Image (spheres, grey):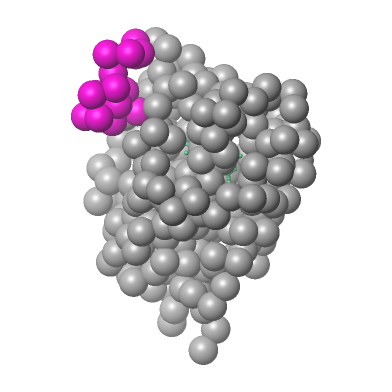
Amino acid sequence: MKNISVAIDGPAGAGKSTVAKAVAKKMDLLYIDTGAMYRAVTFLVLKEGIDIIDEQMIIDIAKNTTFNFSTDGSEIFINGENHSKEIRTPRVSEKVSLVSKIGDLRTVLVNAQRKLAENHDVIMDGRDIGTHVLPQADLKVFLTASVEERATRRFEELSKDNQAESVSFDAVKKNIIQRDSIDSNRDQAPLVKAEDAIEIDTTTLRTNEVVEEIIKLIRKIQR
Ligand code: CDP
């Protein structure tokens, strides 16, 4: 039987990974967090002190890095080491969209993402999944929420991780607005809703309501 693929796209902090992870668990799908891969490369770039204009070095890093995920998709292993927390620091968030603009880097990561998805029922989240990584996905969802709500959610997440001391709510909001702008205006595979994607505005919805809505949509395509 053909494998099922679900694409979840949307702007920063719209709740994609929380929702995708929960849907994956309930529907027994493999969850692939593509943002974690762009963050992982950015983490390595910062760790090695590489200048963002040195594109070839960044592409080489991505080519020579192995990315593995824990079974539930929530932890990322970069060259075998768990760096799930370090990739979500405000420092990485500040630079990740600039790194993600590099076209040839995207090609390397997209190939790796398609490989991870091979022969599995998958749910993959990111910015270009429905438009570019899995254009034949059986279901495409575009999650949105107001900027205020997205910044609030992200700030709360950082507070839980004890990282909020290093950043203010306004700085988190500014970063989200900046990233959305860079992600939407880049040349290769920008953030845009696929024509055939179903948009869900999550501003006033609880996580479980969004999860249930997506599960309903998956059940429809399984029929
Ligand atoms: O979790 P959040 O919405 O903040 O972002 P993320 O999914 O972790 O992605 C971090 C950044 O990676 C985004 O702002 C994009 O610059 C980049 N990204 C991308 O370009 N394409 C993807 N498929 C996923 C992420």
Residue for point 65% across, 42% down: 61
- In this rendering, the answer to whether 201 lies above or below 222 is above
Residue for point 68% across, 24% down: 52
Q: Nearer the viewer, residue 200 or 99?
A: 99
Residue 223 is situated, as x and y percent measured from the top left of the image, at 43, 82
Residue for point 42% across, 57% down: 69
Residue 92 relative to residue 154: left or right: right
| Residue 82 in view here | yes
The answer to if 157 sits in the magenta stretch is yes
Residue extent of the magenta highlight? 154-169
Quarter location, residue 156? top left
- In this rendering, the answer to whether 135 lies above or below 98 is below
Q: Residue furthest bottom?
A: 1
Q: Nearer the viewer, residue 88 or 203?
A: 88
| Residue 10 in view here | no
Main secondary structure along the magenta-highlighted residues: helix
Quarter location, residue 192? top right
- In this rendering, the answer to whether 182 lies above or below 136 is above
